[in-house]
Structures are given as structure tokens and as C-alpha cells.
Amino acid sequence: QVQLVQSGTEMKMPGASVNVSCKVSGQIFSLYGITWVRQAPGQGLEWIGWISANTAKTNYSPKLRGRVSVNTDRSTSTVHLELRNLISDDTAIYYCARDMGDRIDPWGQGTLVTVSS
Amino acid sequence: SSELTQDPAVSVVLGQTVSITCQGDSLRNYFASWYQQKSGQAPILLMYGKNNRPSGIPDRFSGSTSGDTASLTIIGAQAEDEADYYCGFRDKSRNYRVFGGGTRLTV
């Protein structure tokens, strides 16, 4: 079955950048897009952005546009999220998930990113 | 507006029926999908489209839409259904996703 496995916990200083990876297995990589979602402590789900694994076309949340980038490495079936100029409000669990248009399924296990001085 | 509104918390007696609602103008044009998130876990897909359940999701869960409101109904709620529930949809015209604020269900 399709699995999305994410990279491990990150702790960063304010102003730094973070990269989170998401390796896809169990399907043809280019078949669907990948969506990124984050969840701050005790809060709800916030959509970050999306990439087509086929065309590498992207779209980002207006709130994060300019600080976020998503790209793919088709050779390793991996999607990468980069978030720059980190602030404390970026502290959250970051999830990748297969985006099938009318649904997001399955989700990765999540990556905790903590931004603190 | 692309916003989705959910009640922050809902409770149900074990074995009874409960509906969790999700309201937004965009739901007149798009079906919502529903996600269940148990404490400390990643969300999982619960319902999508008109009333579609992924394999492995119990049939006590069902979905419906009326006007600008989507509903997730649990018939015979179980203790393991205690979780946070989120609705969401993809705005195809602007190619971004929106989630509701989530509903914490207490059984």
C-alpha cells in the first residue's frame, strides 16, 4: 500500500531554514500530487502548499508564499519542503499527504519542527 | 468566502448518534472530505465525495451535504471514535486547500 515516510524532528533557531522530506512508496510517484499541512501545538490543520509530482507545478498558501518552497526528486520518489526565515509561530508538526484532488490520503507520520532560541 | 466553520466541541453518549457539521459557502460547489485525528496521531481520511468511505472505515460513519453545510454522522458512536474531526475541500479555481477549525468529539 502507499506509504509516506517523513524525516525526523528538527530544532531550529529563529531566522534559520528547515527542510522536511517525504518519501513516497507503493505507487507510481508521478501519479498524484503531494500536499503539505502543518499543525501548531493545540491548534487545527493549516494547508501549506501543494506540488504535482508529475509536472512539479506548485501552489502555496498566501500566508507563507515567499518563505516556502516545495520540490520533488523523482529519482528517490521524495518530496522536499523548505521553510525559510523561521519564526516561533512556525513551531508545528508538518505533515505530507498524497493529494488525490477530492481527498488527501494517506498522510505521513508527521515531523515536529521547533523554532526556539 | 472559502472559510469552513465547525463547532469546536461536540459530545455524544456511547452508542448514540451524533452529527458533526461543517459550514461554508464553497460547499455549495465542492464536496467536503473528512479527517479523523486521534491524540498524538496523524490525521486519517474518513469520508470524501458525496458519501464515500475508504476501505477500513466502519460503516457507522456517513457523510452528507445540504446547501452550504456538510455533515459527518456517526450512528452508534464508540469509545474509539473520541477524536478531533476536520472537514476540508480543495478550491479548484484557486488551487488551494481549506480546512475547518476542527471539532473535538467526546464520547
Image: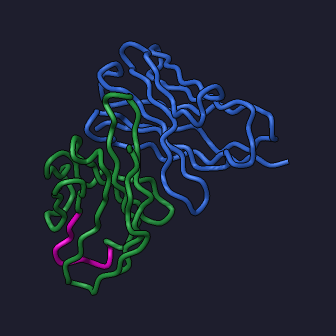
Chain colours: A blue, B green
The answer to whether residue A97 is left or right of residue B62 is right
The answer to whether residue A41 is left or right of residue B35 is right
Label count reads: 0
Residue A57 is one of the magenta-drawn residues? no
**Residue in the image at 40% along x and 54% along y:** B100
Q: Which residues are magenta?
A: B72-80
Considering only vertical position in the picture, is B24 above or below B38? above
Residue farthest to the right, as pictured: A117
The image quarter in which residue B92 lies: top left
Considering only vertical position in the picture, is B77 above or below B61? below
Q: Quadrant of the N terminus of chain A?
A: top left
Q: Position of residue A66 (x, y in %)?
A: 64, 25
Residue B73 is one of the magenta-drawn residues? yes
Q: Position of residue B10 (x, y in %)?
A: 36, 76
Which is nearer the eye, B26 or B11? B26
**Residue in the image at 61% along x and 28% along y:** A68
Q: Position of residue A26 (x, y in %)?
A: 32, 31
**Residue in the image at 28% along x and 33% along y:** A101
Q: Position of residue A61 (x, y in %)?
A: 52, 34
Which is nearer the eye, A113 or B94? B94
Considering only vertical position in the picture, is A70 above or below A103? above
**Residue in the image at 34% along x and 34% along y:** A99
The image quarter in which residue B69 lies: bottom left
